[in-house]
Every structure is written in C-alpha cells, then in structure tokens.
C-alpha cells in the first residue's frame, strides 16, 4: 500500500543472473520514506549494490517496478528522477582536472543547471572532513582511493538530492575519515529534516549502529529483515 511519505519504492523487483534459475534480486519490495535514514547490510554478493542500482534505475529489472512518489518512473521522467535520486558508486569515476573541476562538472548538464557551485559551502564541508581548502586544487590523478570517495561525496551532496544512495562510501578510508564522513552526511541530512533521505550500504556493523537508521538486511537477493 502506497503512503504519501514514500519517496522511492521497489515493488516486487527481480533481476535474473546468467545461470539458469539464478536470481540476483528476487521479489524485492521495500521503500525509502521522506527524511529517512536507511542502512542496508548483508554479506558480499547478497544483492546490496544491485538493490541501490535498481532503486536509481541504473540497471535493468526484469520484473516489478520502481515508483517515485507513488508513480511509475519511465520514459522522459527518468532524467529528472535520476537528478533527485543520486547513486554514489563505491569506486566513483572522476574526470581530468582538479577536485574543483570535478565538483563543477555536473552543473554543465541541463538537469543540474539550477545548482550554482557554492565554493564556501564546499569549504565548510571540507572542514568537517578535516581537509583544507587547498584540497580543491589537487589533481584528480593524484588522489588516493579515499580522497576520490570524498570528492565524489561532495559532488553528490552539493546537488541537493531528495534521496542519496551510498554504496560503501567509506570503504577506502581510515577510521577517523570514516567517522568524519558519517558526520558530514548526517549533518547534510539534518539541514533539511523531513525532506532529505539517505540509504547507506555497509559491511561495517559498527557503522550500521552509528548511523542510527532503519536497518534492512539482504540475503541471496532478497530482503530478509526490516520490511
């Protein structure tokens, strides 16, 4: 049953694997509510990443549907949907140039043209991440894996999505930087309580506990707990 506070819903979503009878996602029904913080846990290969990619319509689904505010997302509605529901890959690709160049890049696309680049805001977020303003001048080719994750996170949250889908966003970071990222994303979400929603995939039980959100467990492509 659809309720008015549900932003994104997966309804009986399934996706086949390559082997006969194999299902990568099987009859998954779940939702993300307005202002919610949802944590997805499960073993490697359980379907966590595939769930996020299905929710963001980046991968095909063979059965079921993805709904946005109770409506089926299809056709010319997809680009706007993807601008409001942003998926952050565990190993995000970056373009050539500086960190600042990479942060400015999305504003060159029509779907994000209304978002100006706010350097002062980025610098305040860098302070939370224990990084100086000069981080913006670093060349992307010189970034570590963890620094690339930080850059991609900043690039995503500056676009003010309604739903932020984070796939192991701290996997390449040390503990101090991990907790700084957790502070940043919870601070970002709290700036507009009741509107911004967050879905975090993690294998770290400590992180799942610290995020203090509703927990969904994936097992063999199914939701096993939390819905």
Image (spheres, helix red, strand yellow):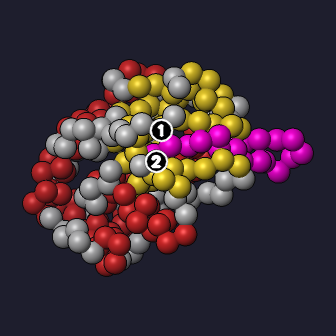
Q: Which disc, if any, is residue 2?
A: 1
* Residue nearer the viewer, 4 or 147: 4
Side of 139 relative to 187 (left or right): right
Disc 2 on helix, strand or loop?
loop
Which is nearer the N-term, disc 1 or disc 2? Answer: 1
Residue 123, position in %: x, y?
14, 56
Q: Residue at coordinates 40% horizontally, 66% vertically from top-left?
A: 80
In this picture, is 111 found above or below 127?
below
Question: Judging from the image, what secondary structure is the residue with disc 1 in?
Answer: loop
The image quadrant that residue 128 belongs to is: top left
Answer above or below: position of 108 versus 156: below
Q: Are marks 1 and 2 in contact (CB under 8 Å)?
A: yes
- Direction from residue 25 to residue 10 in the image, left or right: left
**Disc 2 residue crowd, few under 14, some 14–19, many 20+, Cα 10 Å:** some
Residue depicted at 66% across the width and 32% down the height: 222
> In the figure, is residue 173 to the left or right of 51?
left
Q: Residue 17: which disc?
A: none
Q: Which residues are magenta?
A: 8-25
Q: Residue at x 41, y 55 (%)?
A: 86
Observer-nearest residue: 14 or 73?
73
Q: Residue at the spot x=34%, y=78% of the render?
A: 110
Q: Which residue is mark 2?
A: 70
Residue 137 visible to the viewer = no
Q: Is residue 220 above or below residue 15?
A: above
Badge 1: residue crowd in 10 Å (few <14, some 14–19, many ≥20):
few
Q: Is 83 on the left-hand or right-hand side of 91? A: left
Q: Does 195 appear in magenta?
A: no
Q: Position of residue 67 (x, y in %)?
A: 51, 50
Question: Image quadrant of residue 49?
Answer: top right
Main secondary structure found in the magenta portion: strand
């Amino acid at each position: 049953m659809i309720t008015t506070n549900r932003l994104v819903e997966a309804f009986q979503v399934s996706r086949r694997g390559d082997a006969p009878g194999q299902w990568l996602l099987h009859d998954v029904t779940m939702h993300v509510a307005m202002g919610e913080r949802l944590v997805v846990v499960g073993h490697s290969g359980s379907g966590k990443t595939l769930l996020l990619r299905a929710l963001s319509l980046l991968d095909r689904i063979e059965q079921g549907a993805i709904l946005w505010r109770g409506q089926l997302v299809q056709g010319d509605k997809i680009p706007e949907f993807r601008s409001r529901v942003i998926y952050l890959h565990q190993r995000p690709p970056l373009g050539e140039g500086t960190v600042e160049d990479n942060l400015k890049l999305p504003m060159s696309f029509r779907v994000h043209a209304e978002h100006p680049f706010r350097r002062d805001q980025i610098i305040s977020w860098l302070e939370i991440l224990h990084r100086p303003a000069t981080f913006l001048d670093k060349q992307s080719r010189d970034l570590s894996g963890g620094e690339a994750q930080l850059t991609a996170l900043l690039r995503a949250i500056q676009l003010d999505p309604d739903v932020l889908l984070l796939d192991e966003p701290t996997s390449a970071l040390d503990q101090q930087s991990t907790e700084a990222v957790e502070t940043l994303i919870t601070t970002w979400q709290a700036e507009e309580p009741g509107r911004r929603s967050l879905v975090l995939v993690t294998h770290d039980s400590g992180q799942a506990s610290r995020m203090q959100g509703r927990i969904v467990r994936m097992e063999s492509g199914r939701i096993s707990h939390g819905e």
